[in-house]
Amino acid sequence: MVRVTVPATSANMGSGYDSIGIALELYNVIDLAENDHIDISDKNGQYVPQDESNLIYQCAKRVYDECGKPLSGLTIVEDCAIPQTRGLGSSSACTVAGIMGANMLLGEPLDRNAVIDLAATIEGHPDNSTPAILGGFCVALLENGHVHHVRVPVHGAIDFVVFIPDFQLSTEKARAALPKTIDHHDAVYNLARAALLAGSLTTGKLENLDVATGDCLHQPYRFGLIENGEDIVREAKKLGALGAFISGAGPSIVAIVYKGDRDYITRAQELCEKLYPHWKAVQLRCDEVGATVKRL
């Protein structure tokens, strides 16, 4: 049996649509072992698909198929702390867990780059899967089945507070809200800010983050699907956040905060309790390790 631990991720970060993401210290822990049938369970009693439709199983089987190895079945035990359909990379974490777990069971025929490429190919875009594997702050693009990426540590002066609602938003619904074409002006707006975001997060030019997380490609169209989403972003900044944005496809909101502002999380929790009871605030540091796998 092998155990895979995969961090949550927050993609887009405002301006970096489908290209920028960070790993966060919230984890799915998945145990896998070969079996002659499919046996899937969840340690916390949550519902998970228990047949071939299970995403972890599908991704594990993909590795076996890619390597030309037969797979009769798997035992999969899930212990998932990443909330589903909240924009925190839960599906990406399952994809990575299935790939890395199967790869370890087979003796690691796939190197790290092959794992990154396969995960992004299955996901369709690399801004969640790449930081989930590598940790840290990643800029990535998928071209011709290969992920071109840069991974750097997040600047030590910042932390993240995640506002998580008690309702879900599917990626499919969030993507369906986007327009099929955009104006040239909007493309330039985001390109400049995405570049500024990457440079500012890694060099410590933190005063740029409010502007750098600005976006006109996806957030304006998705806020209508997230009750109080715009309010949370506005209030998070009023509380002292350096910047705030929709996490992935939503509905969670991430605020970038000074690590030295130790009372920010308390103010954020009080805000939710008083004005937005369907939301909770959680402080999460950047995960700098990424996904790990070990034999039990």
Image: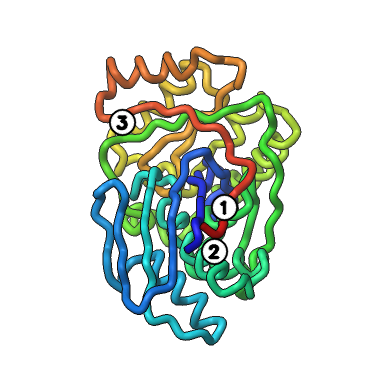
Q: Write down the residue under mark 1.
A: 291
- The amino acid beneath tag 3 is Asn
Secondary element at image label 1? loop
Task: Sort mark 3 into few (<14), some (14-19) or many (20+) by Cα contacts within 10 Å.
Answer: some
- Kindly indicate whether the residue at mark 1 contacts the one at mark 2 (C-beta within 8 angstroms): yes
Left or right relative to 8: residue 83: left
Secondary element at image label 2? helix
On the image, which quarter does residue 196 sit in? top right
- Label 2 vs label 3: CA separation? 37 Å
- Which residue lies at the image location 68% right of the left edge and 57% below the top edge? 149
User: At which x and y percent is residue 157?
Assistant: 67, 24
Q: Write down the residue under mark 3.
A: 228
Query: Of label 2 and label 1, which has the lower sequence position?
Result: 2
Is 93 located above or below residue 237 in the figure? below
For the residue pair 135 and 64, the one nearer the viewer reads as 64
For the residue pair 228 and 25, the one nearer the viewer reads as 25
Query: Of label 1 and label 3, which has the lower sequence position?
Result: 3
Left or right relative to 202: residue 177: left
Q: Nearer the viewer, mark 1 or mark 3?
A: 1
- The amino acid beneath tag 1 is Ala
Q: Write down the residue under mark 2.
A: 100
- The amino acid beneath tag 2 is Met
Residue with the most extreme right position = 203
User: At which x and y percent is residue 238?
Assistant: 46, 17
Is 64 located above or below residue 56 in the figure? below
